Image (cartoon, rainbow, N blue to C red):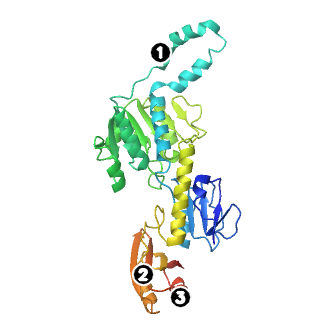
Amino acid sequence: MYKIKTLNKISEEGLKYFDSNKYEISDDCLNPDGIIVRSAKMHDMEFPPSLKAIARAGAGVNNIPVDLCSEKGIVVFNTPGANANGVKELVLTGLLLSSRKVVDGINWAKTLKGKGSEVAKLVEKGKSQFAGPELKGKKLGIIGLGAIGVLVANTAKSLGMEVYGYDPYISIDAAWGLSRAVHRAVSMEEIISDSDYITIHVPLLEETKNMINKEKFSLMKKGVRLLNFSRGELVNNADLLEAIKEGIVASYVTDFPTDELLDVENVIAIPHLGASTPESEDNCAVMAVQQIMDYLENGNIKNSVNFPDCEMTRTTNYRTVVAHKNIPGMVGKITTTIANDGVNIMDMMNKSKKDWAYTIIDSDKKVSDEVVEKLTNAEGILTVRTI
């Protein structure tokens, strides 16, 4: 029986996939095999030796100590693309809000309360202060062409925008989904310098933190509209406020309010609503549950942020999976140790990702507990499981 701990309220649409004969689900179990989490902070948590995987029902994993998990051989999953449509729709809303001064107009209209029969006349007289350009024919620059960026690009193109995308690491799947009418930018500077609208869709990493800063703002067209529905820290707020004062940024729409951005003219701060749809929550939960089940039951890894994707169809009833450091000689050490115990390897797969690697081995019989212990104690090996 596998034990799964939930740290947040997880959609029943996902949890219902767990077979009650195989899984025990609770929010207070002491020695879980897996954890499913949404936004709960895990950096100060103690991880028991039983923990094999953490599945984040969402894309960002800032709330999870990924490096510590890697060192312990704990696979961390996320659910890229599961909430993509929900975020895409809010990005499109942001494009319109940034252009048409809808928020300012609504707030101004509320001030007319009590004017009685004069309201209609006052509306016609005052509406001109909220005029703004249409999206059709304008140039949209998209930084990052993952699941969300591709959807935004394709939809914006259908709205008549001239769309440019920049992503030096675009995946094959994303490339297949991208409309051929979307132009490929050769650099971020091209996107920044030529676009009327810019939207950011990259993960928050050490190298992307504050990627939109004073230097980048100096390259932008006067009156650009900037959208950030990825992570607040991608934009340097101090430099942003200066760019707004100088008229470089006509509007900044963000899904990540901070104290210095609230009540600032030309800043539209949305309270992190990108994935706040029932459909997104359901999709993320389903993907998280299916990924952690496949890992626990079959040892397969898909959509891990710290270990490589490694999926192999089972060819025998006996499988051994090994998480280890990505250093020379590891595969030989693993296979030799298994073969020396009289076990014949029928099929295997090894994949690596930066400092870490993962090996799946199907054999003609079960690898003994003694061999598992020997491998577990070997230098460079993090975890060993027989399934």
Amino acid type at image mark 1:
Ser
Which residue is found at the position 67% from the left and 71% from the top?
31
Q: Is residue 171 visible?
A: no
**Nearer-N-terminus badge (3/2):** 2
Q: Is residue 79 left or right of residue 119?
A: left
* Spatial separation of the CA atoms under disc 3 and disc 1: 78 Å
User: What is the quadrant of the N terminus in the image?
Assistant: bottom right
Q: Mark 2 points at which residue?
A: 330
Under circle 2, the secondary element is helix
Which numbered disc, 3 or 2, marks the residue closer to the eye?
3
Q: Do the residues labelled 3 and 2 touch (CB within 8 Å)?
A: no
| Residue labelled with disc 1 | 128
Where's residue 46, x and y in %? 66, 67
Which x, y percent locates residue 192? 36, 40
Residue at the image position 39 percent from the left and 79 percent from the top: 347
SS type, badge 3: loop
Residue at image location 59% in from the left, 31% down from the top: 263
Q: Which of 200 and 351 is in front in this view?
A: 351
Q: Which of marks 3 and 1 is nearer the N terminus?
A: 1
Mark 3 lies on residue: 368
User: How far apart are the two marked residues, 2 and 1, measured between alpha carbons?
Assistant: 70 Å
